[in-house]
């Protein structure tokens, strides 16, 4: 799976412009956000793919826990971030090797002062063994 979800593929699945569009929709100005969002691949285990939406603090901004703790619920519903569409795009990258089933966003995790992560778990069905 790491051969499929390279950094280039992750950037294609969740382009930097999506962060700008998110803050434009939220605040009316893309520069108002306190963080940039990127997608990282964490692995495959027990029939599910594990990704992370990584929130990287912007220079001069504060990435406080009280700002990020409620984000999984917001991200799950937000039309610009479109997590359901992201999962559908991830399924396309699997090229028939598996089907994406249910997905869920976990609780925000503070990795350090300037990086918070929101886990994305996608359950797979119809996994074909090579």
Image (cartoon, grey):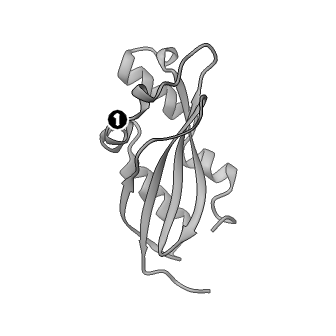
User: Would residue 24 be found to the left or right of residue 7 on screen?
Assistant: left
Image quadrant where one finds the N terminus? bottom right
78 above or below 62? below
User: Would residue 103 be found to the left or right of residue 40 on screen?
Assistant: left
Residue 108, percent across and down? Answer: 44, 42
User: Would residue 75 be found to the left or right of residue 115 on screen?
Assistant: left
119 above or below 16? below
Answer few, some or many: residues within 10 Å of disc 1's Cα (few below 14, many 20 plus, some between 14 and 19): few
- Secondary element type, mark 1: loop
Q: Nearer the viewer, residue 69 or 124?
A: 69
30 above or below 52? above
Q: Residue, x 37% and y 59% (percent of image)?
A: 103
Residue 36, percent across and down? Answer: 56, 29
Q: Residue, x 34% and y 44% (percent of image)?
A: 76
Residue 90, percent across and down? Answer: 50, 59
Quadrant for residue 29, please give it. Answer: top left
Q: Residue, x 68% and y 49% (percent of image)?
A: 8
Quadrant for residue 3, please give it. Answer: bottom right
Determine which residue is flagged by label 1. 70
Image quadrant where one finds the C terminus? bottom right
Quadrant for residue 104, please give it. Answer: bottom left
Q: Nearer the viewer, residue 21 or 56?
A: 56
Q: Residue, x 62% and y 45% (percent of image)?
A: 11
């Amino acid at each position: 799976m790491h051969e499929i979800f390279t950094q280039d593929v992750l950037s294609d699945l969740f382009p930097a412009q999506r962060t700008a569009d998110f803050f434009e929709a939220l605040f009316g100005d893309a520069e108002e956000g306190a963080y940039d969002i990127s997608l990282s691949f964490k692995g495959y285990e027990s029939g599910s793919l594990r990704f992370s939406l990584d929130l990287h603090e912007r220079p001069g901004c504060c990435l406080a826990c009280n700002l990020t703790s409620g984000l999984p619920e917001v991200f799950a519903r937000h039309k610009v971030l479109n997590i359901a569409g992201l999962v559908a795009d991830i399924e396309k990258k699997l090229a028939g090797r598996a089907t994406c089933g249910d997905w869920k966003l976990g609780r925000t995790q503070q990795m350090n002062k300037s990086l918070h992560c929101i886990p994305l778990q996608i359950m797979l069905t119809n996994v074909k063994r090579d």
